[in-house]
Image (spheres, rainbow, N blue to C red):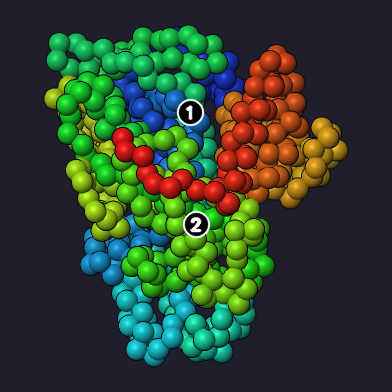
């Protein structure tokens, strides 16, 4: 069911037009772009921070345009560990303010996106009583920092307790343990909900629409040029302020205005592997507290699979589809294999996905694990507002900060943010009744899979979920590519056929969409067998 919206909507269509998807139709969105050439704020980037900025500013009553070169959350924001959390590891590093802020934001998301964010219990297996006592003390502090936003108190577990909760764990690795609570979500689904909610509050939010250049008014940004992908048409737009929310690509955007701009970010990549659900019985997640590189590793039940991650490897380049480095997949398999009765192998990996973290810290850094997950908002000499760093859990507070700064740059009187109590609209998600229709296998000759969307789900993704291409549907409106890359590859022809009928594609466009996605899905599946040998230098 779709969550109710809090606050007043901004008159972008009546209830019926919202329900049947007219307000989200591409033609309607482009008509709005044609009708307006000047905006209070233009946001570049459709990930967590950019969508958060668009919603925050629109809810304050500003005219907002957001453009995203690919799809919403196509980069880092769809490749997270799927956790809304305070950060147990940051607690161990003494970053109490960061943990406290994240726990407050976790509580807000559980309220404002109740159908997208859910409590999840974690079990931390221990091998010594002293380790269990120390973990219990730290996680007790975690509960205290959460305060009224707590989800349940941590508790010490005996060996028998752990065996009951986690029968697939090796007994010698779980002589006791500690249980605590955090939250889980679907990152891409939350991104779509943010996009929909921003539109319903008056923002114009466009995926597959790329920044091409900035226009200066003297020494300050006065506007920009964007190109809409499908038509190839360019638009020259005015803006009182521009917010750069492009994540790991933020330095590149800043260098469009100043080629010698110093590096602000130090990208780090995190690899996740996806294995079958029976490797981890029960509904709880596992946190492996000690790894060879000093990180923690999670095993998390997610949408009928188990998500294992992650790594923290510095990169100098910024590929749209990063590959695992030599040893990263083996590191994850070996780490969790020490704890599971049945150790997973490469043959058990259903999909591998890689995200790039926009960590604060320019210049050469030997290890990115120690870099801050906090955020910063910078203003360039040209007036470009850049929101840097951060993580999904704190996207809302990051956006509030960025819009506050953008107000100053634009010369607007301050209007307070209202997003701390604003419910998100998730009508772009699948509805349970959609599974009653014949699956794509029956309609379009594709082998059925529990992770493959039905034809009606595909149509809904286009109609209400702002999906424009096959990848949008199979990677982010459903999570098929991330859950079973081979099933996603087999589903591509059927999804392309449904979308072609709905969007009026030519045969050439249909074939191109299908073949491009099949090649992408083959890479996600092949990553379980082959890896890049080293990060290329940028």
As drawn, 477 above or below 164: above
For disc 2, the marked residue is: 329
Mark 2 is surrounded, within 10 Å at the Cα level, by few (under 14), some (14 to 19) or many (20 or more) other residues, namely many
Q: Secondary structure at mark 2?
A: helix
Nearer-the-camera pick, 37 or 365 = 365
The residue depicted at 69 percent of the width and 48 percent of the height is: 451
Residue 275: which quarter of the image?
bottom right
Image side of residue 56 versus residue 5, left or right:
left
Residue 95 location (% of width, % of height): 24, 63
The residue depicted at 59 percent of the width and 25 percent of the height is: 468
Nearer-the-camera pick, 298 or 285 = 298
The residue depicted at 14 percent of the width and 15 percent of the height is: 219
**Residues under labels 2 and 1: Cα distance?**
27 Å
Nearer-the-camera pick, 85 or 111 = 85
Nearer-the-camera pick, 376 or 75 = 75
* Residue 299 seen in the figure: yes
For disc 1, the marked residue is: 70
Residue 170: which quarter of the image?
bottom right
Residue 441 location (% of width, % of height): 82, 39
């Amino acid at each position: 069911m779709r969550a109710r919206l809090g606050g007043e909507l901004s008159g972008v269509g009546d209830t019926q037009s919202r329900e049947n998807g007219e307000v989200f139709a591409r033609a309607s969105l482009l008509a709005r772009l044609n009708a307006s050439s000047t905006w209070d704020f233009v946001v570049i980037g459709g990930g967590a921070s950019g969508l958060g900025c668009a919603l925050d500013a629109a809810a304050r009553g500003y005219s907002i345009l957001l453009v995203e070169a690919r799809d919403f959350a196509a980069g880092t924001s769809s490749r997270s560990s799927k956790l809304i959390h305070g950060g147990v590891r940051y607690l161990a590093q003494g970053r109490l303010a960061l943990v406290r802020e994240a726990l407050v934001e976790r509580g807000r998301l559980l309220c404002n996106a109740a159908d997208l964010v859910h409590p999840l219990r974690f079990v931390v297996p221990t091998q010594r009583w002293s380790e269990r006592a120390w973990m219990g003390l730290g996680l007790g502090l975690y509960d205290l920092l959460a305060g009224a936003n707590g989800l349940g108190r941590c508790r010490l577990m005996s060996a028998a307790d752990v065996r009951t909760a986690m029968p697939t764990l090796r007994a010698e690795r779980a002589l006791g343990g500690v249980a605590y609570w955090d939250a889980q979500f679907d990152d891409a689904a939350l991104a779509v909900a943010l996009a929909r909610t921003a539109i319903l509050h008056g923002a114009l939010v466009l995926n597959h629409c790329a920044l091409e250049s900035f226009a200066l008014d003297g020494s300050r940004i006065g506007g920009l040029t964007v190109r809409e992908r499908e038509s190839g048409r360019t638009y020259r737009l005015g803006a009182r302020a521009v917010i750069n929310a492009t994540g790991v690509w933020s330095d590149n955007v800043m260098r469009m205005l100043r080629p010698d701009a110093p590096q602000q970010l130090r990208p780090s990549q995190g690899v996740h592997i996806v294995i079958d659900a029976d490797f981890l019985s029960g509904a709880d997640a596992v946190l492996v507290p000690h790894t060879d590189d000093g990180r923690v590793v999670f095993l998390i039940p997610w949408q009928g699979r188990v998500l294992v991650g992650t790594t923290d490897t510095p990169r100098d380049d910024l590929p749209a589809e990063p590959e695992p480095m030599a040893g990263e997949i083996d590191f994850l398999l070996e780490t969790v294999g020490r704890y599971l009765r049945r150790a997973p192998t490469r043959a058990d990996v259903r999909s591998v996905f890689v995200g790039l973290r926009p960590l604060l810290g320019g210049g050469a850094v030997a290890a990115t694990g120690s870099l801050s997950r906090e955020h910063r908002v910078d203003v360039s000499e040209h007036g470009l507002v850049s929101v840097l760093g951060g993580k999904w859990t704190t996207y809302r507070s990051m956006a509030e900060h960025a819009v506050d700064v953008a107000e100053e740059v634009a010369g607007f009187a301050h209007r307070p943010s209202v997003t701390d109590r604003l419910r998100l609209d998730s009508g772009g998600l699948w509805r349970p009744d959609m599974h009653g229709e014949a699956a794509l296998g029956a309609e379009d000759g594709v082998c059925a899979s529990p992770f493959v969307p039905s034809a009606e789900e595909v149509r809904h993704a286009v109609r209400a979920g702002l999906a424009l291409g096959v990848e949008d549907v199979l990677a982010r409106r459903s999570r098929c590519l991330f859950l079973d890359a081979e099933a996603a590859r087999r589903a591509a022809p059927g999804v392309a056929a449904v979308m072609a009928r709905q969007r009026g594609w030519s045969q050439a466009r249909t074939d191109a969409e299908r073949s491009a996605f099949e090649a992408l899905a083959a890479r996600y599946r092949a990553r379980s067998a082959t890896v890049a040998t080293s990060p290329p230098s940028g």
